[in-house]
Image (tube, rainbow, N blue to C red):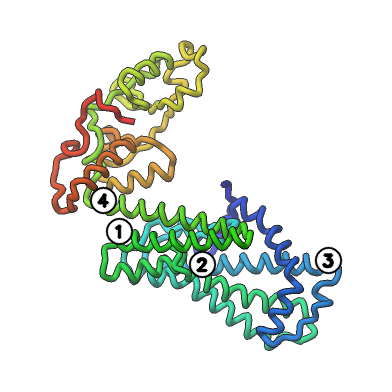
């Protein structure tokens, strides 16, 4: 989804996902339909004397609902800043904080693997929410009883922030509680194993929330359950890959330059596709006078109408600025970059900036399967580049 930059604080960009702009009025309306019920709950729970007649007169419920919804997401934003500032303290820069329809996300540049650092980062958000809840509750003591609207909003946000803290502490990895669980599990286990266990618990919590959402016809709860399940599975997979590729560089899994097939910029698209079919390649670096000037893929070729492929050349459809990565980079970081940028291959360059080889997702996944099957530990992976994982044959299927 597209996001819009709202501003920044503490050097951290704050973004609004388009889903947030769509869901904010919905939350305001939902809160407005519950004003009468919430007045009864708040009066009973906090010993208040809110006048339900004033709060439900005319358009007042909608006004109160929208202000409460804005206050709710402001609390979510502060919750995420709690995570972000502690993460920065431990040396993990924050790329951005984004508000979307299920709350907020503080995007860390890297994942802390020290259990104490993760524990403190994970618990910081709920502590901020608890602090907000207690602080707003104390404010109630200085608000005159006649200020019903203000009293309702402060009381509602006090309770909702405490509820937000409690909900986030459920062990539904990758929620805060799930990350706390992983941190505690990682005290005596490897980070990958702790992630796997926390993810399995998170999937169980997601299934329970999903069932509750179905029986209560709560679409938001079902959506939260879905994203917890997907998030747990995804992060578990990412951590497993990262652990498997410990000590493995791009040079270890790439196809070396002398084994990489290239194509010429003046070649027709029809001829290119025929070559892809013949060699079972779906991408080629484009070379001119011993210089790589771009990269062309099957997806690029497919955009040309079949009847016009003889008239178009590789130059017309290639990407003139191929994505590159250093041969010394870690293989896991290469895969993460491919996933983040939605690309299937990277041009590998040496310390002089010249092409050292080509790396594809297939190379990485083949290496992962071999490591997983062999059970090789990082200290046992002494091999020459391209020796263990890729045979270098131009006839082997690559992408």
Residue drawn at x 67%, y 65% is: 70
- Say the numbered circle drawn on residue 192: 1
Real-space Cα distance between discs 2 and 4? 32 Å
Numbered mark located on residue 81 in the image: 2
Rendering quarter of residue 40: bottom right
Labels 2 & 1 near each other (Cβ < 8 A): no
Label 1, label 3: how far apart the Cα atoms are: 53 Å
Rate crowding at label 4 as few (under 14), some (14 to 19) or many (20 or more) other CA atoms within 10 Å. Answer: many
Residue at the image point whose x is 40% and y is 18% from the top: 273
Dot 2 crowding, Cα within 10 Å, few <14, some 14–19, many 20+: many
Q: Residue furthest right?
A: 58
Write down the quadrant of residue 71 in the picture.
bottom right
Q: Earlier in the sequence, mark 2 or mark 1?
A: 2
Q: Nearer the viewer, residue 10 or 234?
A: 234
User: Viewed as shown, does residue 142 lie left or right of 338?
Assistant: right
Toward the viewer: 365 or 330? 365
Q: Which residue is mark 3?
A: 59
Q: Which of the two discs, 1 and 4, labels the residue nearer the N terminus?
A: 1
Q: CA distance from mark 2 to mark 1?
A: 27 Å
- Mark number, residue 311: none
Left of 97 or right of it: where is 62? right
Residue contact at pointers 1 and 3, CB within 8 angstroms: no
Q: Position of residue 116 (x, y in %)?
A: 34, 71
Per the image, the residue denoted by label 4 is 244
Q: Closer to the camera, 200 or 117?
A: 200
- For mark 3, give the secondary structure: loop
- Mark yes or no: residue 212 visible: yes
């Amino acid at each position: 989804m597209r996001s819009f930059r709202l501003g920044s604080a503490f050097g951290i960009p704050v973004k609004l996902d388009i889903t947030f702009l769509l869901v904010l009025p919905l939350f305001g309306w939902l809160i407005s339909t519950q004003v009468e019920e919430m007045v009864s709950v708040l009066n009973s729970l906090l010993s208040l004397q809110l006048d339900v007649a004033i709060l439900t007169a005319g358009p007042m419920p909608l006004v109160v609902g929208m202000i409460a919804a804005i206050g709710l997401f402001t609390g979510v934003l502060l919750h995420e800043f709690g995570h972000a500032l502690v993460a920065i303290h431990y040396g993990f820069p924050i790329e951005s904080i984004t508000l979307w329809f299920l709350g907020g996300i503080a995007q860390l540049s890297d994942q802390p693997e020290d259990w104490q650092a993760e524990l403190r980062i994970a618990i910081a958000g709920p502590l901020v929410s608890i602090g907000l809840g207690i602080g707003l509750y104390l404010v109630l003591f200085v608000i005159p009883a006649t200020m019903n609207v203000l009293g309702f909003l402060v009381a509602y946000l006090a309770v909702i922030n405490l509820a937000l803290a409690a909900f986030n502490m459920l062990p539904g990895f990758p929620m805060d509680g799930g990350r706390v669980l992983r941190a505690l599990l990682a005290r005596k286990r490897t980070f990958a194993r702790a992630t796997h266990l926390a993810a399995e618990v998170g999937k169980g919590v997601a299934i329970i929330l999903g069932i509750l959402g179905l029986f209560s016809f709560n679409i938001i709860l079902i959506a939260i359950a879905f994203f917890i399940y997907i998030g747990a599975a995804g992060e578990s997979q990412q951590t497993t890959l990262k652990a498997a590729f410990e000590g493995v560089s791009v040079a270890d899994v790439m196809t070396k330059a002398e084994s990489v097939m290239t194509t010429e910029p003046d070649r027709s698209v029809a001829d290119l596709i025929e070559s892809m079919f013949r060699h079972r390649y779906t991408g080629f670096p484009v070379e001119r006078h011993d210089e790589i000037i771009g990269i062309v893929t099957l997806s690029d070729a497919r955009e040309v109408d079949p009847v016009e492929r003889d008239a178009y050349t590789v130059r017309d459809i290639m990407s003139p600025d191929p994505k590159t990565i250093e041969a010394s980079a870690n293989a896991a970081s290469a895969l993460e970059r491919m996933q983040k940028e939605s690309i299937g291959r990277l041009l590998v360059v040496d310390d002089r900036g010249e092409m050292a080889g080509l790396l594809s997702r297939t190379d990485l996944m083949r290496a992962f399967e071999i490591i997983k099957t062999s059970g090789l530990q990082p200290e046992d992976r002494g091999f020459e580049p391209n020796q263990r994982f890729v045979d270098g044959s131009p006839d082997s299927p690559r992408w």
